[in-house]
Image: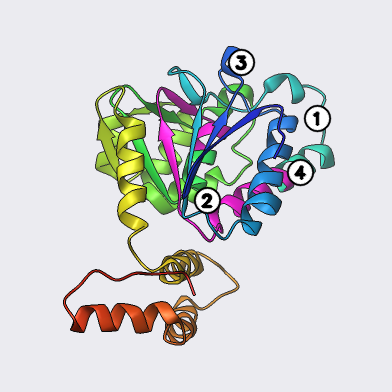
Amino acid sequence: MSYQNLLITEDNPFITVTINREKALNALNQQTMSELARFFGEDLPQRDDVRGVILHGAGDRAVVAGADIKEFTSLQGEDGANMARRGQAVFFMIERSKVPVIAVIQGFALGGGCELAMACHLRIAGEKARFGQPEVNLGIIPGYGGTQRLIQYIGKSKAAELMMTGDMLGAEEAYRLGLVNYVVPMGEEMGKAKELLAKIATKGPRAIEKVIESVNAYFSTSEDGFETEVKSFGEVTLTEDFKEGAQAFVEKRSANFTGK
């Protein structure tokens, strides 16, 4: 896997993806978005050995401080709509990943950076992390799913306030509102993410995949989440992992899941 703006680090069975544009505060330009699409849409789905992904930004100032505004200046009408559609498509790839994706936030997660973090399944924030959708300061709105996912995490009223004022949330308030899973001291963010992935990796991989699928179905307008759950439950009962998990429980031992 060869990338220009992403660093891919293998730590079997996990992969760390680093957005490597530190001088630009890891801003999401179209090259970076294309590489994220290639990783989550093409490369990762072919890797049956991967059990989780950590996504973060280079340095400690920002996971992503927003989209690359220099690429916005010439947008008009349908060009802008197409850019938003492409961005949403990339973030849907992350949200629908069959393995858990944890965002590590060390600093700012603003605009597209906040949208990127929200597309991940879990979020670990450093104590100095800051979140926001300040697009109204530029006379635009969030376009990569922010108007929808922020409501899902923190509710309609607070989400509307943040998006209309452009204000930021500190790490503790983001935790209180349910936007992040954990807040940890600076320097401990990656360790917490790895600890969480290691715990998840002891569970049945197919079951984790179906949890992700069923949770996503709750927010889908084209799916009945309860029916997705029923279908997924039936499918996992056919797996070798289910047989192993049940047998291990009876025998009072740890299960040896293989993902089959």
The quadrant in which residue 202 appears is: bottom left
User: Considering the numbered disc 1 on the image, is that residue within a helix, a strand or a loop?
Assistant: loop
Identify the disc placed on residue 81.
4
Q: Residue furthest top?
A: 23
Question: Where is residue 19 shown, x and y percent of the image?
Answer: 58, 29
Cβ atoms at labels 4 and 2 below 8 Å apart: no
Cβ atoms at labels 1 and 3 below 8 Å apart: no
Label 4: few (<14), some (14–19) or many (≥20) C-alpha neighbours in 10 Å: few
Q: Amino acid at mark 3?
A: Ala
Q: Earlier in the sequence, mark 4 or mark 3?
A: 3
How far apart are the two marked residues, 1 and 4, measured between alpha carbons? Answer: 9 Å
Q: Amino acid at mark 2?
A: Gln
Q: Earlier in the sequence, mark 1 or mark 4?
A: 1
Residue 180 seen in render: no
Q: Earlier in the sequence, mark 2 or mark 3?
A: 3
Residue drawn 35% across and 41% down? 194
Look at the image and give the residue range highlighted in magenta: 86-115
Q: How many numbered discs, if any?
A: 4
Which residue, given by chain and number where applicable, does mark 3 sit on?
24
Q: Amino acid at mark 4?
A: Ala
Quadrant of the frame with the N terminus:
top right
Identify the disc placed on residue 75.
1
Question: Where is residue 45 shown, x and y percent of the image?
Answer: 63, 58
Q: Earlier in the sequence, mark 4 or mark 2?
A: 4
